[in-house]
Image (cartoon, grey):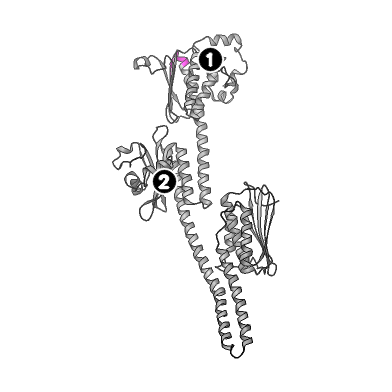
Amino acid sequence: MTRPALAAVATPAALEQASTVPGPTGRSVVRPASAASPGPGSGPRARRSRDSRPGGALTGDGTLAALVEAVGAWLRTPTPPERRRLSNDLAAYAEAHGLAGLRLVLRPPLPAVELGTGSLRRLPSRDRMSRLERRLLESADGSGGLGEVVVDGSRDAATATARILELAASRARALARARAGEEELAALDEATRGIAGVLSAERVLQQIVDNVRRLVGARFAALGIVNEQRQIDPFITSGLSRAERDRIGPPPRGHGLLGLIMEEGRAIRVPEIRGHPRSVGFPPNHPPMRSLLGVPISVRGRVLGNLYLTDKEDGAPFTDKDQRLVELFAAHAGIAMENARLHEQEQRLAILEERQRIGRDLHDGVIQSIYAVGLMLDDALEVVPTDPAGASEKIEHAIESINLTIRDIRNFIFGLRPEPLDQAGLVEALAAMAEEFRVNTMIDIALEVNGPADFEMPADDTMQMLHLTREALSNVARHARATHAEIRLVANERALELAIVDDGVGFDPTARRGPGHMGLGNMRTRAAELGGELLVESGVGRGTRVAVRVPLGGAAPGVA
């Protein structure tokens, strides 16, 4: 028996050129392009002749295309509904092609499934199996076996059916690999952006653990860093609920297999955890885990912890590809930890420098002023008997100096105050900050807002804007000697500009600043973290304008 029609549709081009048509149950199915237009021997008479042959070609109901579509759907989403769909379409194909029975077996790395219909609904005996037509399914790229198909029918029908299912499975697998590659790149990009954005180390590590578990297809994943006290902290998990974590109790202590990973500084794959000589078992309430893939997290040759996964969802063992992917994410985890350490050191240094600056400012300003007041009062005390009017004048000067000193102290306090976290949004917080500035500095200030009142910013970005505004106002209070200041906020759907303007003495922005003057540098750093830019306009005797422009919703900086 020949199989010209089946061979015509069992090609990648035919599968690619398929068109969607209504199926017999009202569901849209894919009909190969070769069936869409008549060719030689394709008229009604010829079609009836082929349909009548057992194991013949694609019938008018499109069962072959429906089966191809069902195989692809199962490989994309191996869920119970897709399993039932594949079983139904397998039965419809066998009936339409006159096959007494048909059995399909797909094996890892594909989502495993075994389905039978007709005389092969149940697994046949070994003796009967030897009399059936059995074909192995090989991947189109030669990378290995995909499963097998067993047919209770002719040899040609078995060969043609196997070829069709091979192509369908190989194509779906290739598409899945492409999607997996895109997901891997997206996950790595997310981790990289988190590291570059100086997110908290724990937040970046949680992203890494969640993404690597999803990409590998594991049920559980965890990441542990060993601190200076040889305790695992932090310990970050994925696949366990908060309640499950609480029932398990404290994090592991780094013994057993987890200790082996750190001791040897290399990846390990264990198909059966309980059977490994280094296994120390699980604590009470711990979910059962069978297989393990663990890799060390290292920075500059020093092992900091480990990243490990357990139990693939499809029951398959962990592969070399899985290990390479986990090692890649472990390297990103190491970078995140090192980046967090450097950022913490930078923050500590900034705090130390700020303390030194405050100490210098207090010593050179407030303390010297108080010392001068003390000298004036001493002078007044000496001349009270001989020159009461002169003593009174000295006391008045002392009181005036004390008032100025109180103002300076208020300015310092304003620069150290935390942001108004309880405000509803940026505009409300800016209004509260302006009022606080007016009360503490006795400098007149106005808030001007132009643009939609309902624009939104993420909470973290709003906090950055408030920190930047406070830094600018603190500079006005300490250095500008201004009588009036303004906060100007301009926003549209694309971008936002916030400017702090004063009428003070101004300064030369191009002049080199001393080591204790970090205000502008801090503001530039905050603007960059917001994806925007900082603009400084000033001159001696001309006042100062400090503005930050940031995008809203991913737009480029700049306000129209």
Q: What residue appears at the point 30 percent right and 43 percent down from the top-left corner?
A: 280
Residue 308 in view here: no
- Where residue 81 appears, as percent x and y from the top left, is 49, 25
42 drawn magenta: no
> Any magenta on residue 153?
yes
Residue at 54%, 72% in the rendered image: 362
Say if residue 134 shows up in the picture.
yes
Classify residue 374 by image quadrant. bottom right
Q: Which of 113 and 328 is in front in this view?
A: 113
Residue at (55, 63) in percent of width and height: 416
- What segment carries the magenta color? 150-157
> For residue 57, which numbered disc appears in the image?
1
Q: Of 309 and 150, which appears nearest the observer?
A: 309
Task: Give SS at disc 2.
Answer: strand
Classify 10 Å Cα crowding around label 2: few (below 14), some (14-19), many (20 and above).
many
Residue at the spot 54% in from the left edge and 23% down from the top edge = 11
Where does label 2 land, which residue? 223
